[in-house]
Amino acid sequence: ATTLGERLLAWRGDAELSLHDSQLAGVPLHATLKLDGRKPGWAVEADLRAANNHAVLKGRLAPRAEEDRWRLDLDAPSLAAIQALLDLHPGLAAALRGPDKAAVAGQLSAHLQSQGRWPRLAIDGELRAGALQAAGLRAARLQMKAQAGPDAQAPLALQVDGEQVLFAGLRADVLQARIDGSLAEHRIALELQSPLRPPAWADPLLGGTDGMPMFESLA
């Protein structure tokens, strides 16, 4: 079956769309979209501002899948300012509000780069959040770095660090998680500092450390 990407690559042309000084659900909006397909492939540049939150997407859909390149940069210092926009989609709003139906809040920044096309996709990204509240997750501070390659032997790395994290009734004053290696063979390490003391029988599994359960696994 022909994919959407393959259909787009068969077209030629260019276009530019813009939205200035607009509002949707009371949220100020500014957006531009540029598409350039005059040469084989498509260059894409999108810029969106919602209140004081800003997202930029740049990339290229290339004739050869392995030459696709994409980059997303997000700077969202006020997630609460876009709640009214999110509420326009009931399903999305419900998922982001979580079981306690709390509005999204906090600050979020992210940078994501990709090379290639699914399923042979290489990605490299970083996310930082502060005073985050979304989808039932609350965190005073959260940072994540990730790297993954297009096959099972490519380097795989995931690093998560958090403070004052609350999710599904579980609380961690300090959270550290690591995955290193490749999809085929990797090491997983998890370290938690929580005010909740696990039962005594779990001490051998968690390392028996005071308030700092640890788990490490090879896969």
Image: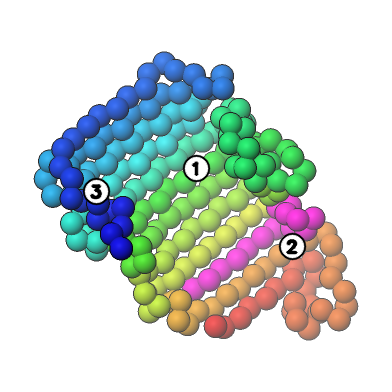
Report if residue 15 lies within the magenta region.
no
Specify few, some or many for label 1: CA neighbours under 10 Å numbering under 14, 14-19, or 20 or more: some
Residue with the mark numbered 2: 193
Q: Amino acid at mark 2?
A: Gln
The percent coordinates of residue 65 (x first, y second) are 24, 61
Residue with the mark numbered 3: 8
Relative to 65, 203 lies left or right? right
Instruction: Return the mark for residue 109.
Output: 1
Q: Amino acid at mark 3?
A: Leu
Label 1 to label 3: alpha-carbon separation:
30 Å
Helix, strand or loop under label 2: strand
* Residue furthest front in the image: 1
Label 2 to label 1: alpha-carbon separation:
25 Å
Q: Amino acid at mark 1?
A: Ser
Q: Which residues are magenta?
A: 164-180
Q: Classify 126 as above or below 154.
A: above
Helix, strand or loop under label 3: helix
> Chief secondary structure of the magenta span?
strand
The percent coordinates of residue 78 (x first, y second) are 57, 31
Q: Nearer the viewer, residue 146 or 213?
A: 146
Which mark's residue is nearer the viewer, 2 or 1? 1
Residue 90: quarter of image: top right
Q: Nearer the viewer, residue 99 or 69?
A: 99
- Residue 69 visible (yes or no): no
Q: Classify 66 as above or below 19.
A: below
Which callout, 1 or 3, points at the residue further toward the start of the chain? 3
* Residue furthest right in the image: 200
